[in-house]
């Protein structure tokens, strides 16, 4: 039993961290007050991918954390035209953004700088994201959303 407890503590302290979603910018997949585990170690072994849901330090106040979806990676050309996202000249398929959560904001074409990425919430018409604060440094990302554990009826892997 002590070995199981020690392994569990190791996993929670060093590999996974419980966090609470505050706000509705990631609806419909993550709701306000959902509790989830983030994988703190995954990006030591693999690179960040477009579509990953990541937790990062808010660029303007490192005492706050945000959770958003990675839309564009370093070197990608990004353009948003009345809410439609284009990456490297192709329209990005975003099945995770329901029509009722879309907005009509635009962003002129830009190239994402080295060591930075572009993040956006899935509830586009209320999300404070890279459209407001620009690309974020990859060094601010400290975890990948892995699993919702509360409320139980919404438990499951984060996509």
Image (cartoon, helix red, strand yellow):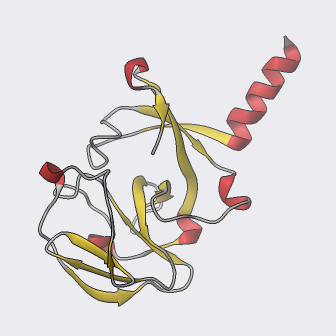
- Which of the 4 image quadrants contains residue 38? top right
Left or right, 7 with respect to 58, comes to: right
Q: Is residue 159 above or below residue 51?
A: above
Q: Is residue 5 above or below residue 130?
A: above
Q: Quadrant of residue 3?
A: top right
Q: Residue at x 73, y 34 (%)?
A: 11
- x and y percentages locating residue 153 in the rendered image: 38, 19
Residue for point 55% across, 85% down: 114
Vertical position of residue 159 compared to residue 70: above or below? above
Whole-percent x, y for residue 67 in the image: 41, 52
Q: Name the image quarter holding the N terminus.
A: top right
Q: How many marks?
A: 0
Residue 58 x, y percent position in the rendering: 42, 62
Image location of residue 48, percent across then percent down: 57, 64
Q: Quadrant of residue 87?
A: bottom left
Q: Tell which of 86 and 143 is nearer to you.
A: 86
Side of 149 relative to 105 (left or right): right
Q: Nearer the viewer, residue 121 or 132?
A: 121
Residue, far right? 3
- Residue 69 in the figure: left or right of residue 80: right
């Amino acid at each position: 039993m002590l070995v199981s407890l020690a392994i569990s503590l190791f996993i929670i302290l060093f590999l996974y961290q419980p966090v609470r979603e505050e706000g509705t910018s990631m609806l419909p997949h993550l709701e306000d007050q959902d509790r989830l585990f983030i994988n703190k170690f995954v990006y030591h072994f693999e690179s960040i991918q477009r579509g990953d849901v990541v937790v990062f330090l808010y660029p303007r106040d490192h005492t706050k954390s945000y959770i958003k979806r990675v839309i564009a990676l370093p070197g990608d050309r990004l353009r948003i035209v009345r809410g439609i996202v284009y990456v490297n000249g192709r329209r990005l398929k975003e099945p995770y953004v329901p029509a009722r959560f879309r907005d009509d904001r635009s962003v002129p074409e830009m190239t994402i700088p080295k060591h930075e990425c572009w993040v956006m919430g899935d509830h586009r018409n209320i999300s404070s994201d890279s459209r407001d604060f620009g690309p974020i440094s990859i060094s601010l990302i400290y975890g990948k959303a892995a699993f919702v554990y509360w409320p139980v009826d919404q438990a499951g892997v984060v996509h």
